[in-house]
């Protein structure tokens, strides 16, 4: 079961650095992310989601591949690929994987204009390595799927990881 973490930052650049750091930690096998999204509340109040993966692009590519294969059967591979790509893109754009987009937009409405949050959907993590790596960026925990006791322990661990940097 995955755990959700939503952490607010004063600006988009910091949130994107945290996202990039989390992706780097995943490459080191220290964290297993199901999804990571930066939610930006623009100065005009609009919410923008910066997704890790584009389901539209993936859908278009797989649709074009399968459309081309089916088109070969009817001696029209290019037409099949075009129709398959368009259909795949439509299906991909309607697909939502990871953290629910509507939920992220609702939480994003609570952010100050110009600020951002990172949503991490974590399958597993090596906490003693991941917490200090992400804690150095600061941030405020908005929401987690942890129990109250686990969340309190996380807040304590973050403060402990930030203490050497403050001193």
Image (cartoon, rainbow, N blue to C red):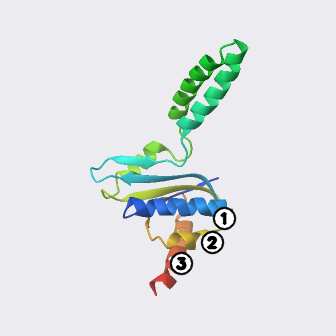
Q: Where 129 falls versus 36 (above or below)?
A: below
Label 2 with label 1: CB-CB less than 8 Å: yes
Label 1 with label 3: CB-CB less than 8 Å: no
Q: CA distance from mark 1 to mark 3?
A: 17 Å
- Report which residue position mark 3 lands on: 161
Q: Where 82 falls versus 18 (above or below)?
A: above
Of labels 2 and 1, earlier in sequence is 1
In the rendered image, residue 43, in percent from the top left (x then y), is placed at: 28, 54
Few, some or many residues within 10 Å of mark 1 (<14, 14–19, 20+): some
Checking the image for residue 131, the label placed there is none
Question: SS of the residue at dot 3?
Answer: helix
In the rendered image, residue 4, in percent from the top left (x then y), is placed at: 54, 56
- Report which residue position mark 1 lands on: 30
Question: SS of the residue at dot 2?
Answer: helix
In the rendered image, residue 86, in percent from the top left (x then y), is placed at: 54, 25
Label 3 with label 2: CB-CB less than 8 Å: no
In the rendered image, residue 14, in percent from the top left (x then y), is placed at: 43, 64
Question: SS of the residue at dot 1?
Answer: loop
Residue 26's quadrant in the figure? Answer: bottom right
Q: Where 72 falls versus 106 (above or below)?
A: above
Of labels 3 and 2, earlier in sequence is 2
Checking the image for residue 129, the label placed there is 2
Q: CA distance from mark 2 to mark 1?
A: 7 Å
- Lateral position of residue 158 relative to residue 13, left or right: right
Few, some or many residues within 10 Å of mark 2 (<14, 14–19, 20+): few
């Amino acid at each position: 079961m995955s755990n959700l973490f939503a952490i607010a930052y004063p600006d988009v650049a910091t949130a994107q650095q945290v996202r990039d750091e989390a992706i780097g930690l995943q490459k080191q096998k220290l964290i297993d992310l199901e999804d990571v999204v930066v939610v930006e509340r623009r100065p005009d109040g609009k919410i923008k989601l910066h997704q890790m993966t584009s389901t539209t692009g993936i859908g278009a590519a797989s649709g074009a591949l399968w459309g081309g294969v089916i088109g070969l059967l009817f001696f029209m591979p290019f037409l099949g690929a075009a129709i398959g790509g368009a259909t795949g893109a439509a299906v991909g754009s309607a697909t939502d994987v990871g953290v629910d987009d509507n939920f992220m937009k609702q939480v994003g409405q609570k952010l100050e204009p110009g600020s951002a949050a990172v949503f991490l959907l974590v399958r597993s993590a090596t906490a003693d390595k991941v917490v200090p790596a992400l804690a150095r960026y600061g941030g405020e925990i908005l929401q987690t799927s942890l129990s109250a006791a686990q969340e309190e322990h996380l807040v304590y661990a973050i403060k402990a990881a930030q203490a050497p940097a403050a001193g």
